Image (spheres, helix red, strand yellow):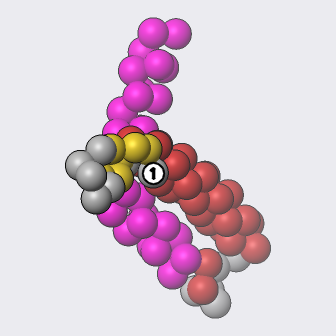
Amino acid sequence: MLEQKKGEQKETQIPLEELFSKLEEVVKNLENPESSLEESFQYYNEGMQLLKRCNETIDSVEKKVLVLDEEGETYEF
């Protein structure tokens, strides 16, 4: 069980740019007319998982972003 948690942590640490790159690759595979229906379904599932991870990463970054106002005070974005 402990190993699985470590693996999950590593997955969440993938840079957003890399997630987008993987997602772009999945889209190209989906657009390939030679892909079978079964392969397309697998690509779709993979793409949806990547999209979910992208959204989670963006949400976590947005929560950490602080905005500096004119008076030098910070507040969460």
- Decide which of 19, 42 is in the foreground and name it: 19
Question: Please, what secondary structure does the residue beneath circle 1 have?
Answer: loop
What amino acid does circle 1 point to?
A: Phe
- Above or below: residue 53 compared with residue 44: above
Does 75 appear in magenta?
no
Q: Position of residue 66 (x, y in %)?
A: 35, 47
- Decide which of 59, 26 is in the foreground and name it: 59
The residue shown at (39%, 21%) is 6
The residue shown at (52%, 70%) is 26
In the image, taking residue 28 as reference, residue 39 lies left or right, namely: right
Q: Residue furthest front?
A: 71
- Decide which of 22, 39 is in the foreground and name it: 22
Residue 46 seen from this side: no
- Decide which of 11, 55 is in the foreground and name it: 55
Does 14 appear in magenta?
yes
Residue 54 seen from this side: yes
Q: Position of residue 43 (x, y in %)?
A: 62, 65
- Above or below: residue 30 compared with residue 22: below
In the image, taking residue 17 as reference, residue 72 lies left or right, namely: left
Q: How many marks?
A: 1
What residue would you read off at disc 1? 77
Query: Which residues lie in the magenta part?
Result: 1-28
